[in-house]
């Protein structure tokens, strides 16, 4: 009767790719927690952080000469060793994912979207899988939970916040790409215009994330994003 929605079962290759990108995300989250612990130790000891990246070259030099008591210095050293080990794991996962997706035209195409690099592109490809199962970009955006709630009662129609139902990973990747999009790109210009018109930056961020999902749809479906190519031309 066509009343039951179909469930798409990802093939083994897609499931394995998902495991990799999700495992990478978990490691990054744990690494962020370790970084927060280092910042907390410096705050306890009253050490001022004068660099933008505490874990870059200049930041590591600052940590080496920081006037910490032996207990805290040992704890910072242990945290740094754990972070270095996790960074090595992340690098290995990145290498594996890049090798698996080297011949994927959709993976290469969506990296032309401002704010979408190799990592976010891998998240999109892994989590979406076969993009042709979505008839339109709107269906993909709805599946990612980036469409507004819709309530109807008699003659009253109310639209609320986004549903946030569906793939949390795709929604996160789209919002992350919207935030990372470089300045002086059409996405940032659209963001500024929407934020000014609606007087709300979060609404503008969601709108840009939805545009990114639309571009991802066409890039994965066609292996190219014609509107971006036309703009470059």
Image: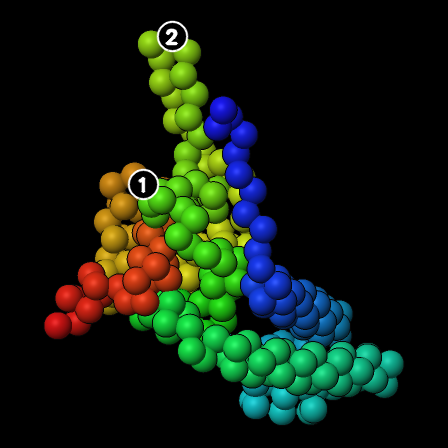
Q: Is residue 215 above or below residue 148?
A: below
Where residue 24 appears, as percent x and y from the top left, is 63, 70
Q: Which mark is residue 199?
A: 1
Q: Is residue 116 left or right of residue 99?
A: left
Q: Residue at x 58, y 67 (%)?
A: 13
Q: Which mark is residue 154?
A: 2
Where residue 193 appears, as percent x and y from the top left, is 23, 49
Q: Residue at x 25, y 41 (%)?
A: 197
Closer to the N terminus: mark 1 or mark 2? 2
CA–CA distance between discs 1 and 2?
Answer: 30 Å
Between 204 and 163, the residue placed more toward the observer is 163
Q: Are marks 1 and 2 in contact (CB under 8 Å)?
A: no
Where is the C terminus found, in terms of image quarters? bottom left
Residue at disc 2, secondary structure: loop
Q: Is residue 189 left or right of residue 110?
A: left
Seen from this angle, which residue lies furthest left?
233
């Amino acid at each position: 009767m066509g009343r039951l929605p179909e469930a798409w079962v990802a093939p083994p290759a897609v499931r394995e790719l998902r495991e990799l990108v999700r495992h990478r995300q978990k490691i990054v989250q744990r690494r962020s927690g370790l970084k927060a612990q280092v910042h907390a130790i410096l705050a306890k000891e009253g050490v001022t952080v004068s660099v933008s990246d505490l874990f870059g070259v200049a930041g590591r030099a600052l940590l080496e000469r920081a006037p910490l008591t032996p207990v805290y210095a040992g704890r910072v050293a242990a945290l740094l060793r754990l972070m270095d080990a996790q960074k090595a794991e992340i690098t290995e996962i990145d290498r594996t994912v890049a090798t698996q997706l080297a011949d994927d035209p959709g993976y290469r195409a969506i990296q032309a979207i401002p704010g979408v690099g190799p990592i976010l592109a891998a998240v999109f490809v892994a989590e979406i899988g076969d993009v042709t199962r979505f008839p339109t970009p709107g269906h993909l955006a709805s599946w990612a939970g980036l469409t507004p709630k819709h309530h109807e009662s008699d003659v009253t129609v109310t639209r609320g916040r986004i549903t946030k139902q569906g793939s949390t990973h795709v929604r996160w990747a789209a919002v992350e790409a919207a935030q990372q999009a470089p300045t002086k790109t059409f996405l940032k210009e659209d963001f500024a215009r929407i934020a000014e018109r609606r007087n709300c930056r979060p609404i503008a961020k969601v709108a840009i994330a939805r545009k990114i999902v639309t571009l991802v749809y066409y890039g994965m479906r066609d292996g190219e994003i014609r509107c971006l190519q036309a703009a470059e031309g």
